[in-house]
Image (spheres, grey):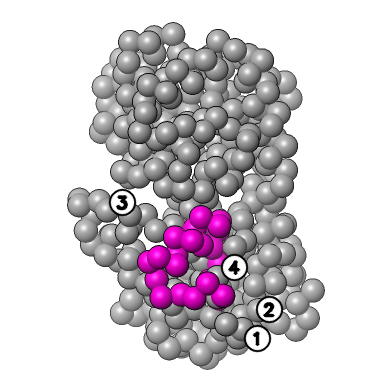
Amino acid sequence: MMGSMRIGFDARAAFLDPHRGFGRFTRSLAEALLQAAPGEVVVFVPHGVLIPPPWYLRAASVVQLTRPRRGAFLVDAPAWAFTLRRHRVDVLHLPTWGVPRGLRVPVVATFYDATPFRFPSPARRWTRHRARRAIASLARATRVHAISRHAGNELLGVAAVSETRVSVVPLGVDAAFTPGPAPVPPRHALFVGGGDPHKNLDLALAVWAHPAAAALPPLVVAGAAAADPRLQPLLATGTARAIPHPGDGELVELYRGALALLVPSRNEGFGLPALEAMACGCPVVAARAGALPEVCGAAAVLLDPDDPGAWRDAVTALASDPARRTELAAAGLERARAFTWERTARGMLELYRLATRRES
């Protein structure tokens, strides 16, 4: 237990970016912390959003922030200074948008990945610049939470943070992600995520654009990548379906009915969809890149993210081999049991203790 510690937790991303990875992480961690340390967490949320009723019961307080609604370099520092004068906390966790200058409380900040440095997108120069500034600002944190060993190693190469101030606490998988009551024949293959260059949507599209894909079930693209114009030729032929904003319930059903989840990313700080798929008994075919080998272990088929032929062969083999699918599903279920939000919350509570001691 944390004793009399008051933990400030910035939960704005849970409401402003609910379908993005860091938004889902923020919401899941907030709920796990409120369960693990009831009465000790001060939750900061955007003004006017609908708060889950249990949060009011378990939080020390729920504070609605009028401005800024999300992190902003010019106004976040004075806004936090004003807020923290009115609402005392012993440690502040900022899971998104970087660390402003001049905060007078110990700060824990979360780092996801170094993609803005490693895989720049020329079409989004301001977004990339902002992301790089946010990552550099983690040097102001008392302690940095890395979501995987891979992420922690990446951070050391792009920000002035000493290794002794970085702690790895893996993510968890929500209890809603479970296998169905009985296996069902594969209805589709699945890609979950955005269309950013490092997500490597092109590889999945290349597999389904090949003539051999006629023997495969359709590709479902769920998440932000569903709006990607590169998907249009496959949508026009019925070879693919797009689901832009699936809720957790819909995602569970998509995982349960999938031949496999494809995660061809060239970099991932963690790879939450892979973990969710495994928890649902869905076979995973993932890139041998980023944190994906660390998260998936031996429970997934791991391939070169730049070899479409190997992916086509792997998916085709799975389609014709129910025994192999069953084997991968069982291995994935076993692997996913090690990743719980309760475990993540315990790790974060220990990290908050370290931050209040200002260890370096």
| Circle number at residue 119 | 3
Viewport quadrant of the C terminus? bottom right
Q: Amino acid at mark 2?
A: Arg
Q: Residue at label 4?
A: 167
Q: Please check the rendered image and state whether residue 159 is part of the magenta-colored stretch, yes or no.
A: yes
Q: Amino acid at mark 4?
A: Ser
Q: Taking 213 as reference, is 231 left or right?
A: left
Disc 1 is placed on an element classified as loop
Question: How far is disc 3 from disc 2 in space, using C-alphas?
Answer: 35 Å
| Circle number at residue 357 | 1
Hey, which quadrant is residue 352 in on the image? bottom right
Q: Amino acid at mark 1?
A: Arg
Q: Of marks 3 and 2, which one's residue comes earlier in the chain?
A: 3
Q: Residues within 10 Å of mark 1 (few under 14, many from 20)?
A: few
- The answer to whether 351 is drawn above or below residue 196 in the figure is below
Q: Of marks 1 and 3, which one's residue comes earlier in the chain?
A: 3
The reply to whether residue 354 is in sight is yes
